[in-house]
Image (tube, grey):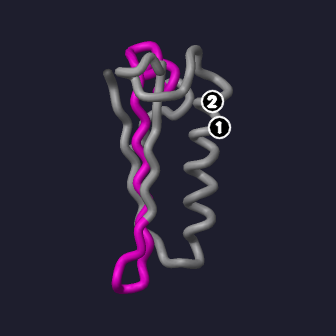
Amino acid sequence: MVSFDAVASVRPQRLAEVQAEADAVILWARTTLLGPEGPLDEGGAWDHERIVTEEGDGWHSLALTLTGDAAFARLFEQAFPAQG
């Protein structure tokens, strides 16, 4: 199993933009990957978890985790090459 994690902390006015980016990645996975979405230990080929929290100082955090097998990892790395 492989997992990819992304975390962003933004002010409220940018939260919709960050949520749209997460939505785009999830949509890519739903339309590109072979196999069903769902927990891997229950037969899913890939899965995701998104958590949005509001911090006490006015910031919002979004955490997105995608999990899958080696084939998933190859497709993900092709679609979203590492930058840095």
For the residue labelled by badge 2, is the local secondary structure a helix, a strand or a loop? helix
12 in the magenta segment:
no
The residue labelled by disc 1 is 27
Horizontal side of 77 relative to 41 (left or right) equals right
Place of residue 43 in the rendered image (x, y in percent of width and height, measured from the top left): 44, 16
Quadrant placement of the N terminus: top left
Residue 6 vs residue 53, the one in the foreground:
53
Give me the residue at 42% from left, 56% from top: 51
Find residue 81 and name its label: none
- The image shows residue 78, relative to residue 63, as above or below, that is above
Distance between the Cα atoms at labels 2 and 1? Answer: 5 Å
Q: Tell me which segment is drawn in magenta.
A: 53-77
Give me the residue at 46% from left, 71% from top: 10
The residue labelled by disc 2 is 30
Furthest-bottom residue in view?
Answer: 57
The amino acid sitting under disc 1 is Leu
Horizontal side of 77 relative to 14 (left or right) equals left
Quadrant placement of the C terminus: top left
- The image shows residue 21, relative to residue 57, as above or below, that is above
Question: How many residues crowd around disc 1 within 10 Å: few (fewer than 14), some, or many (20 or more)?
Answer: few
- The image shows residue 69, relative to residue 79, as above or below, that is above
Place of residue 12 in the rendered image (x, y in percent of width and height, measured from the top left): 53, 78
Residues at discs 2 and 1 in contact (Cβ within 8 Å): yes
The amino acid sitting under disc 2 is Arg
